[in-house]
Every structure is written in structure tokens, then in C-alpha cells.
């Protein structure tokens, strides 16, 4: 390695991370995503993907992607506003808008980019954006990028949000929140936020990365809570429950037209390959028709929570109060999180240890999927019990 000062600074920072059990490495999968994945040549049970419905390796989606490649090629070749906007993408936008009960929608390449596209387009200097402290990193970055006054309120703290809105004299106000918190699994009080948006004439931007496909008969968290309003700008990602990649924004026609004309992260990027839209049409078919997947996932969630309440009460381990597929177990420190994750891996069970700065407190983040069988969830429960009791012994 060349002896540049900056390289030794980077190496020092990495060494510090290692010392604090915060160093990150990537696992290499040698199989498709699924309930069981191949990791370093070994098959393990996977409880840390966001493939909640088991669609990432679904035969109908694979066939649609293959046909999509045959019909449309593999590259889009241009941005949407140039010559990169294809029929399957356009018809998917129409379907997604109707599915979300909104007049219009646009597709964006990823959820991260959707947030970077929307927030700086809608608010800037002289405006204000109000954001939950536990919002996803991409929402935080989007709020910083917007250069609007960036006001953060405590997690789910409706009263604090109201105080901030009441004090604000910003020209334009936007409330931006996760619908389902990605690391906690709870659902935000969106009906309260909508009431505040109406009272203080704000827009409400909802990031439903973990609700779409799963909650509200697949329509997501707004449908689950039976709320809607023209003030709501809805964003869902398509690489988690929907099993493919990308994201969409659904809103009033004027909002979508405004984004198409001004959202830089939408305009200045090559469109995603149209074959992904073909796979997403097939995904939407499954989400609309296959209610059994959501029922199986719900049964897994109930089983897991019930097991924890009966078998692990009094062990001092806290399961966060979540009714979604995200079931986080809070542990006492980073090293414990890593040790528990490793002990589970030794039993061929993959559960991610999530540590700061991703979350304020270290945890094991268990995610359940319709891809799992009941026996697999039962095995997970038994192994979690064993490692938690050994760790506390
Ligand atoms: C995963 C996630 C994103 C980013 O979506 P990608 O499509 O993975 O880029 C945005 N917001 C939340 C809440 C997420 O969990």
C-alpha cells in the first residue's frame, strides 16, 4: 500500500471500528435469495432478508424477467425523459397508481433514489421538513440534500411534531416518515400525522419500504390503517416485499408531473432495465391474487411472538413490540449481538446483528418470510432460546 497519510487515517478508523465490534464485512451468497441460502458453500436458514413474501426467486417472476429480456433487451439505454421510458414501465406505473388508489405514479430505480428525488424536489431553502429521528438513512440524507430547515422529532412523538409545526413559519412544510420502522418493526402513527398535516397545511411523505406487499392486503400501510388524502405522497420500494428492485411514488397528478420535471435523482439517471418492470408486473399479479402468502407470514409472526412471550419471558431479553415481519431482539452490547449472531450461524441459522450507527441500540434483527415453513420458524425459535440461555448462563 502506498504510504499516503490519508490511507493511514482510513486504516486507523477501520481499526477503531474493529475494536468496537463495529467493523462490517459482506457475506457472499452462492444461491438465489430464499428461506435457505448457500453461504460459503454451506446451506443456512435465512432470517435476515426483506423478501417477506418469498418472491425474489418465484418462478412466475423469473419467467417474466426472461421474457422481458427477450422482448426488450437488458439495458434501457437512456434516462426516462430521453428514450429510456418503455411500455412495460409505463403500464406498471398505471397499475401501481390504481393499486395505491392514487391518480398517478412514477417508477424510480431504488428506494434510496426515490427519497433523494422527492424531498429536494418538494422543499428547499425557506421551507421546512419534519422527520422522525428513527427514519431510514436515505430519508435523512434526502432531508439534508434539500437544504430546507430540517426538524427532527423523537420516534413516533406526535406531540413534539405538533410543537415544531406550530412554531414553524416556513413557506412549505413537509412531514417525512417511515411507515414501518425498518429496524424496529412498529407502524408509525400515520393517522395522527395526517391530522397534523391538515391542521398545519403540510404535505405528508410516507416511505412504505416494509409495508408494501405485506400489509393492507398487499396495498401497504395506508390501506392497513384505512387512511388516504391528496396531501399524502406515497413511496414504496419494490426490492423487498415485491421481490425485484426499484421503487415507486404515487400521488396527485400535479405532484407526479412536478417530479418528472424537477426531481434530479429521477431525471439525471439511466432508467432501470425494462425487464425489471416485466418481473414487477408478475410480482403485482402475485401480490394481488396470492393471499395465502400473507396469511402464512402472519402465522409465522404470531408463532414467533407467542414463543418469545411464553418461552423467553424473564430471560432479560427484550423483543420489541412489533406486529410486522421485522422482529428485533434487543441485546446488551455490540459484542453480544455479534456473539449471538455467530452462535446462531454455527447452528446454520442466519440472523443479522444490527449495530450503531444503523440503530441506537444493538440488536438481532429477525425477519420472517412467507418463504419459511412452520418447521423452519420453530427451529429458529428453539435455537434462539438455546443461544440466549447459554449467553445468560
Ligand atoms: C430499504 C429502505 C429504503 C431503500 O430502498 P432501496 O430500494 O433498497 O434502495 C428506503 N427506505 C426504507 C425505510 C428502507 O427500509
Image (cartoon, rainbow, N blue to C red):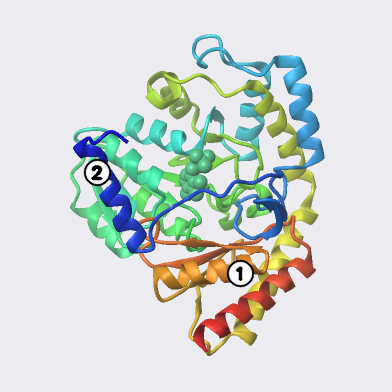
* Disc 1 element: helix
Nearest the eye: 194 or 135? 135
Give the foreground label among 2 and 1: 2
* Disc 2 element: helix
Instruction: Indicate if the residue with disc 1 has its beta carbon within 8 Å of ligand 1.
Output: no
Residue 345 image-quadrant placement: bottom right
The x, y position of residue 148, in whole percent, is: 24, 38
Q: Residue 8 bears which disc, if any?
A: 2
Q: Residue furthest top?
A: 83
Query: Residue at coordinates 54% horizontally, 34% vertically from top-left?
Result: 248
Nearest the eye: 276 or 20? 20
Q: Is residue 259 left or right of residue 38?
A: left
Query: Residue at coordinates 60% horizontally, 39% vertically from top-left?
Result: 238
Residue 367 in the image: above or below residue 130: below
Separation of marks 2 and 1 at Cα, in angstroms? 35 Å
The x, y position of residue 268, in whole percent, is: 42, 19
Count of marks placed on residues: 2
Residue 203 seen in this snapshot:
yes
Check disc 2: other Cα within 10 Å, few if <14, some if 14-19, many if 20+: few
Whether tag 2 and tag 1 are in contact, CB under 8 A, the answer is no
The x, y position of residue 343, in whole percent, is: 58, 71
Q: Is residue 71 left or right of residue 2?
A: right
Residue 313 in the image: above or below residue 255: below
Residue 84 in the image: above or below residue 35: above
Q: Residue 242 bears which disc, if any?
A: none
Query: Residue at coordinates 24% horizontally, 36% vertically from top-left?
Result: 3
The x, y position of residue 53, in whole percent, is: 70, 51
Q: Which residue is mark 1?
A: 344
Nearest the eye: 127 or 25? 25
* Mark before the other along the chain sequence, 2 or 1: 2
Check disc 1: other Cα within 10 Å, few if <14, some if 14-19, many if 20+: many
Instruction: Indicate if the residue with disc 2 has its beta carbon within 8 Å of ligand 1.
Output: no
Amino acid at each position: 500500500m502506498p504510504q499516503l497519510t490519508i490511507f493511514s487515517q482510513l486504516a486507523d478508523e477501520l481499526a477503531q471500528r474493529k475494536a468496537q465490534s463495529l467493523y462490517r464485512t459482506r457475506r457472499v451468497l452462492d444461491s438465489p435469495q430464499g428461506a435457505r441460502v448457500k453461504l460459503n458453500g454451506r446451506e443456512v436458514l435465512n432470517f435476515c432478508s426483506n423478501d417477506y413474501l418469498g418472491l425474489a426467486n418465484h418462478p412466475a417472476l423469473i419467467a417474466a424477467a426472461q421474457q422481458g429480456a427477450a422482448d426488450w433487451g437488458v439495458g434501457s439505454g437512456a434516462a426516462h425523459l430521453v428514450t429510456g421510458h418503455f411500455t412495460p414501465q409505463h403500464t406498471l406505473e398505471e397499475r401501481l397508481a390504481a393499486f395505491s388508489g392514487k391518480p398517478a405514479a412514477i417508477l424510480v430505480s431504488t428506494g434510496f433514489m426515490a427519497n433523494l428525488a422527492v424531498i429536494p424536489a418538494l422543499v428547499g431553502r425557506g421551507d421546512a421538513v419534519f422527520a422522525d429521528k428513527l427514519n431510514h438513512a436515505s430519508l435523512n440524507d434526502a432531508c439534508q440534500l434539500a437544504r430546507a430547515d430540517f426538524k427532527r422529532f423523537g420516534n413516533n412523538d406526535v406531540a413534539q411534531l405538533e410543537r415544531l409545526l406550530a412554531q414553524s413559519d416556513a413557506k412549505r412544510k413537509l412531514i417525512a416518515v417511515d411507515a414501518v420502522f425498518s429496524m424496529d418493526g412498529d407502524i408509525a402513527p400515520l393517522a395522527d400525522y395526517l391530522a397534523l398535516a391538515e391542521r398545519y397545511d403540510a404535505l405528508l411523505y410516507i416511505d412504505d419500504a416494509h409495508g408494501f406487499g405485506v400489509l393492507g392486503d398487499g396495498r401497504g400501510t395506508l390501506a392497513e390503517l384505512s387512511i388516504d388524502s391528496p396531501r399524502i405522497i406515497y413511496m414504496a420500494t419494490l426490492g423487498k416485499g415485491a421481490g425485484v428492485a426499484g421503487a415507486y411514488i404515487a400521488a396527485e397528478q400535479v405532484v407526479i408531473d412536478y417530479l418528472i420535471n424537477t426531481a434530479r435523482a429521477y431525471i439525471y439517471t439511466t432508467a432501470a432495465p425494462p425487464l425489471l418492470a416485466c418481473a414487477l408486473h408478475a410480482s403485482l399479479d402475485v401480490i394481488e391474487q396470492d393471499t395465502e402468502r400473507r396469511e402464512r407470514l402472519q402465522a409465522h409472526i404470531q408463532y414467533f411472538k407467542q414463543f418469545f412471550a411464553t418461552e423467553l419471558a424473564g430471560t432479560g431479553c427484550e423483543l420489541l413490540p412489533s406486529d410486522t415481519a421485522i422482529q428485533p431482539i434487543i441485546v446488551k452490547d455490540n459484542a453480544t449481538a455479534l456473539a449471538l449472531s455467530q452462535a446462531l450461524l454455527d447452528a446454520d441459522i442466519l440472523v443479522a446483528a444490527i449495530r450503531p450507527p444503523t440503530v441506537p441500540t444493538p440488536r438481532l434483527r429477525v425477519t420472517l418470510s412467507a418463504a419459511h415453513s412452520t418447521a423452519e420458524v420453530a427451529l429458529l425459535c428453539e435455537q434462539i432460546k438455546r443461544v440466549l440461555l447459554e449467553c445468560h448462563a
